[in-house]
Image (spheres, helix red, strand yellow):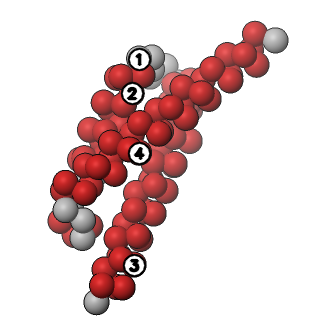
Amino acid sequence: MIGLRRLVVSGAICAFGLGLLLATAIQPAQAQTGSPVLKSEEELIKNNFEQCMKDWDPSTHMTKRDWERVCRRVATDRTKFRMQQEQSEQRMKAK
């Protein structure tokens, strides 16, 4: 039973990570179409965290507290990645 629960939790985390990855790929395209782009790292973390928390559902088989911990970590990591990506793009344009 515990092995099955771990498998379900791992699957939920993987699905969540995949969703964030896809959202990251979509966002630059939205930025090019004139959508407002958040520049502040704190704003990005806050928005990523809030979106993640909206995705929690009791059927995830994770407590809301566990989900919150994962959301905080993923939101921070995703924001750092986006900031590095933007800096890299700016350096490429400057050359």
Q: Position of residue 85 (x, y in %)?
A: 62, 29
User: For mark 3, does the 10 Å Cα neighbourhood hold few (<14), some (14 to 19), or many (20 or more) residues?
Assistant: few
Residue 74: assigned label: 4
From the image, which quarter does the C terminus lie in?
top right
| Residue at 76% in and 19% down | 92
Name the side, left or right, on which 40 lies relative to 63: right
Secondary-structure class at tag 3: helix
User: For mark 4, does the 10 Å Cα neighbourhood hold few (<14), some (14 to 19), or many (20 or more) residues?
Assistant: some
**Amino acid carrying mark 2 in the image:** Leu
User: For mark 2, does the 10 Å Cα neighbourhood hold few (<14), some (14 to 19), or many (20 or more) residues?
Assistant: many
Dot in front, 3 or 2: 3
Would residue 26 be seen by someone viewing this image from the given angle? Answer: no
Residue 40: assigned label: 1
When asked about the image quadrant of residue 84, the answer is top right
User: For mark 1, does the 10 Å Cα neighbourhood hold few (<14), some (14 to 19), or many (20 or more) residues?
Assistant: few
**Amino acid carrying mark 3 in the image:** Leu
Q: Is residue 31 above or below residue 76?
A: above
| Residue at 24% in and 65% down | 62
